Image (cartoon, rainbow, N blue to C red):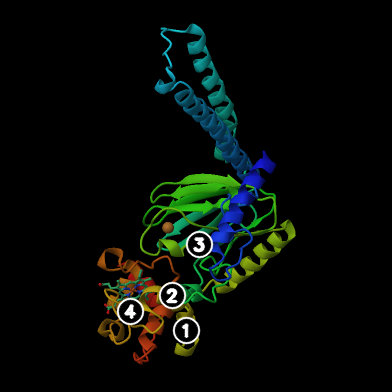
Amino acid sequence: MKSISNKLASSLLVVGAWLGSAAHAVQDLPGGPAVNQLNLHPPVTKIAEEQHFLHWMMLVICTVIFIGVFAVMFYSIWKHRKSRGAQAANFHESVTVEVVWTIVPFIIVILMALPATKVLVAQKDTTNADLTVKVTGYQWKWGYDYISGEGEGLAYISTLDSSHRQMSDSGNVSQAPADYLLKVDNPLVVPVGKKVRVITTANDVIHAFMVPAFGIKQDAIPGFVRDTWFRAEKVGDYYGQCAELCGKEHAYMPIHVKVVSAQDYTQWVDAEKKKAAAKQDDPNKVWTLEALLPRGEKVYAANCAACHQANGKGAGPIKPLDGSALVKDEDHAKQIQIVLKGAANGAMPAWAQLSDTDLAAVVTYTKNAWSNKTGQLVQPAEIVAQRGK
Ligand SMILES: [Cu+2]
């Protein structure tokens, strides 16, 4: 089956390559999409391998039946045509024919359903996981929380690299790298050979967590939890995307899963734990403007620039922050409330999931960036006070 599928896929690829040869030199991304790719992604889990087998087995069976049925049909039409004086046979009920055309399709269906059911049941078996990660879909980023197993307690947000977003906006993709629009700041890191249970949910609208190389795709629904699992068998980088239309930035919420060796995973967990401890900002800490601004600039680039632009000018219904009376106001409450709760029915999203210090930093940044040189400083304590309101 493998060799048939590979041959078929590669001959289709030749046609694809010929069609696409005029395009500029994009490269394959190992673990992600390939140029002129027609076959499924190379499988990295047993489940994905089984899915490949099912896909090609069904396709071959259906093709054989299709060719067989149509060959008999066209041959009969041609052979028994009127101009040759064909006489229609005149008989009713043939027990033999009826038994045969009931039993043969029944056997075929069973042959297809048995292995498919086996895989389906295996896909749904999320028990005995070594590691459980909760994946939360946000408009438009992913949140990863390590719920149990090694790394328990780690939690972070994964967002598309802002330089890729800018490249997309500019329309100039001649220099696009192989991981164009798939590069994120914080990939999901998991150990090789371990069963990882993924619990999906969402914060706003329905998203879907999909990694083709693992053969997984699971809706992430607000107010519900769903789960799926994978056991990656090869170290490497694997890519996917949100697979449920979730709004205007749907195309910009990629998934990057980094599969590493057990030792590397332990090292990564230790490093992340240390980083998290160091970052554990004290919301009562009193910051200086110089210390808070660079942090605010980073938070702004990662979360706000996609809409408000790096230059703070906004666009269309997205209000400019540069020169905004609200942003420059001495009274910080209104601006903090908009940032915490969103505005215009979510057109301006709520950012309550960011930490107090990150929020204080980004509000402070917008109050001092561009032409807004107000010199105003917002402390994390002010964010804490506004959260309850
Ligand atoms: Cu989405």
Quadrant housing residue 116:
top right
Q: Earlier in the sequence, mark 2 or mark 3?
A: 2
Which numbered mark, 2 or 3, is in the foreground of this view? 2
* Quadrant in the picture for residue 18: bottom right
Give me the C-alpha separation between circle 2 and circle 4: 18 Å
Q: Element under label 4?
A: loop
Kindly identify which residue carries mark 4. 314
Foreground tag (1 vs 4): 4
Identity of the amino acid at label 4? Gly
Residues tagged 3 and 1 counted as in contact (Cβ below 8 A): no
**What amino acid is at disc 1?**
Leu
The residue carrying pointer 2 sits among few (fewer than 14), some (14 to 19) or many (20 or more) residues within 10 Å by Cα, namely: few
In percent of width and height, residue 153 lies at 57, 58
Which element type, helix, strand or loop, lies under badge 1?
helix
> Please, what secondary structure does the residue beneath circle 2 have?
loop
Q: Residue at x 57, y 55 (%)?
A: 15
Give the answer, above or below, for where 363 lies relative to 341. below
Q: Quadrant of residue 80?
A: top left
Which of the two marks, 2 or 4, is nearer to us in this view? 2
Residue 149, position as x, y percentages in the image: 63, 51
| Label 1 environment density (alpha carbons within 10 Å; few <14, some 14–19, many ≥20) | many
The quarter in which the N terminus is drawn is top right
Residues at marks 3 and 4, CA–CA distance in whole angstroms = 24 Å
Q: Amino acid at mark 2?
A: Gly
Which amino acid type is marked by label 3?
Pro
Residue 254 circle label: 3
Q: Earlier in the sequence, mark 3 or mark 4?
A: 3
Residue assigned mark 1: 292
Precedes in sequence: disc 1 or disc 2? 2
